[in-house]
Image (cartoon, rainbow, N blue to C red):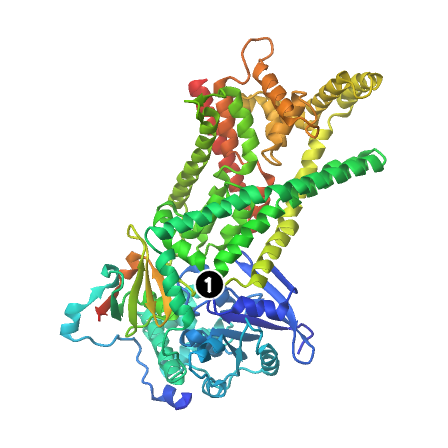
Amino acid sequence: MSLIRIVLNRNIYPLYLPPVSSPDEIMQLKKLSECRRGEIGVVKTITPRTLAVSLMALGMLPGDELEVVNLAPFGGPLAVRVNGTKIALRRSEAALIEILPA
Amino acid sequence: MSSRPIRIALAGNPNAGKSSLFNLLTGLRQKVGNFPGVTVDRKAGSFALHGGATASLIDLPGLYSLYPEAEDDRIASDVLRLPSHPDHPDRVIVVADATNLRRGLLLLSQVIDLGFPVVLAVNMSDLLEADGVRLDAGKLSKDLGVPVVKISALKKRGINELIQAITATEKPPLRTFFRFPEAFRNAAQTLSKELKLGSDYAGFQALLRPDLFPGTDPEIIAEQQQKMGISDPAGIVENETVVRYDNIGEILVGSLKKSDTARERLTQKVDRALLHPFWGYVIFIAILLLVFQALFAWATWPMNLIDTGFAAAAAWMKATFPPGFVSELLVDGIWSGLNGIVVFIPQIAILFLFIAILEDTGYMSRAVFLMDRIMRPFGFSGRSVIPLIGGMACAVPSIMMARSIPQRKEKLITILVTPLMSCSARIPVYVLLISLFVPDYRIGGFINVQGLVMAGMYLLGFLMALLVAWIIKKVLRGGKAGYFITELPLYRSPRWKNVGLVMLNKCKTFVWEAGKVILLISVLLWVLSTYGPKDKMQAVTDAYEPRIEALQKDSAEKAALTNEYRARKLETSYAGIMGKTIEPVIRPLGFDWKIGICIITSFAAREVFVGTMATLYSAGDPSTADPEGKFAMLRSRMGAEVYEGTQRKVYSPVAAISLLIFYAFAMQCMSTLAVTRKETGSWKMTFIMLFYLTGLAYLSSLLIYQVFG
């Protein structure tokens, strides 16, 4: 399983398309900003792409499972745990992330 | 190789252990400065390579990827991306946290593609292996194409192996990590050549993120973008990131942790309390009170010790050296200037003791989390709370702390308004002025009215800081704001060596950088208040010295006459002349020329106001005993002062309030200015601070005196 093979095998498309959700799933999608403490879900879409790139760099990718672990009061930031990393983001940014509740 | 040492950069995610590794490699051979043009710590040092040659080492600020969104996160990636950057390294050590390897390898893969000779240092692999996951460095090295060394910065393991590896790694890896589509190759190569970048990958980045390549002709990049038909460059960056992670995921199969480590479980538990919507704030306020108490109370005795020590040495020098210009310059000018620098060290050391502990344990980002919602409307960062509270003790260390605020605009706002918080140097001024117009009376025998006014002054400073911050936020053009996404790192116990080095470095840079300006201004102020037009000064001397000589030693008359002599001399000096010259300007505020002199001399530090007043009102040598009696004497003489030829009191209640407000707002502290200059690296910002604060003070006092006077 050498690196070379992986790189050559991968068909690089010019734009990244998140994994397609079934219509059933789309109905269940929920903004991260609307989640309560303790809610668990799978990251589905992050828009815009610049936010997606920033979050991926911190270790949050579409398809990853996350848990809302802390909420600051009065509409302050929220903290999620994803892949063992805790990430804090403002509600306004959380509103740009859609998750599929587990 | 040329004769210059090999330049090595340490890059890695925040909290991957970069700083610990840097401290281990360089020891005390390190220097903290600024990156050119920005208020971001630049830590540089040197260490010996295997075989003895010296390499220079630079510790880059933590970064997650080479595609930063916020302008303020750019420095580290600029250093790596731009061969023209003065700190551009020859080789790179990428430090990755073994328990968060996937993310660390994303950065590594980008650094590889920039064409550097790279070594990967996997830190904390012992923690991963304690969890039952084996990390095969040999296999990882084969898959990545770069040497991999397992280290433990905490236990000082693997450091020699790392030095050997970086010594031997002279060439970049044979293959790049990310193969961008063939279609892009031509454009990337063209841009790499035209912009003089080190690699095709840098050219590819220029194609997608022209904003990361300042100073280049946008036409060149736009032309290539058009040729390629790129309409959504962010999508291509997103795709690149996903492909990198896919590859990393395949490499790391079996090397990723399966369950939470003990530290992760602990962090979860601790955060349930520290980020609690109620108890979290209680704990945060308790920590703030502790920091404030430490700055306010604990720093007092070493500061007094420093002042007493300097005074004793000054007395000794005066007695030992032959009198004359040189010894006066040395003792009253330079020595007291040095005193004014050294006296800040206890407060700086204590504040940074706390700051370093709060940062090192991981608490600081929790404070940001808790305070973000409250501070944001005023243009502050959650981090601004600590400089603002610290500003109630002293603005100097607080402004030094503000540099750790990552966003440039928030950092600037915090620095600019921190001097409005009522610092401890204002207390003696407030006490004196309040006692002039507020009776020493207790409401219901319990609440002291003077104390109430004092508390009001603290509140006034705080509210003004909020107001000014809000105005600056509205006025200042915000750069690219970026997102507020912060990692809340795992808690850990503070590494005392790191804490000690932070304290040492902060004190050192203050003494060397801000100290120069402070020394210069204090010598200048000494000259102004000691020397005057020769003939006039001589006349004062001739009038007093024979009379003082004639009086009996230690007699009350002699002391009184000496005080009067001092007052006359100050009045005749250049500072005295300046005080009289500015009188027409400050008269509308209700100030006379004596206050004018005080404003000039207390530019050194606010508390000098009281000493100068004491001299002008012949209320005794500030260094003699019985401060209570002197204070009462000064107060009664100031209270009795009338304008010449009238019965009108100089210190009418309105004039005293006007002066009080003036000292609440005016930039009467050369050390704050010196440290602002050092922190912002800009005289422009320093003068903006000086003029807005003094202007605010002037207008407020003017308003009060003209409306109510």
Asked where in the image residue A72 lies, by quadrant, the reply is bottom left
Left or right side of A84 for B391: right
User: In the rendering, at what x and y percent does residue B309 appear?
Assistant: 72, 41
Seen in the picture, residue B421 relative to B276 is either above or below; the reply is above
Q: Is residue B568 left or right of residue B547?
A: left
The answer to whether residue B222 is visible is no
Q: Is residue B183 above or below residue B213?
A: below
Chain letter for mark 1: B
Residue B543 pos. (x, y %): 79, 16
Of B300 and B352, the residue lying toward us: B300
Callout 1 crowding tier (Cα within 10 Å): few <14, some 14–19, many ≥20? some
Q: Position of residue A3 (x, y in %)?
A: 41, 87
Depth order, front residue of B652/B489: B489
Write down the residue under mark 1.
Answer: B74
Seen at 39% across and 44% down, the residue is B475
Q: Position of residue B103 (x, y in %)?
A: 41, 73
- Please tell me whether mark 1 sits on a helix, a strand or a loop: helix
> Does residue B409 show up?
yes
Q: Is residue B662 left or right of residue B581?
A: left
Up-down relation of residue B247 to residue B421 (above or below): below
Instruction: Residue at 51% x, 41% y: name it.
Output: B689
Amino acid type assigned to the residue bearing label 1 in the image: Arg
Number of numbered callouts drawn: 1
Residue furthest to the front in view is: B445
Picture quarter with the N terminus of chain B: bottom right
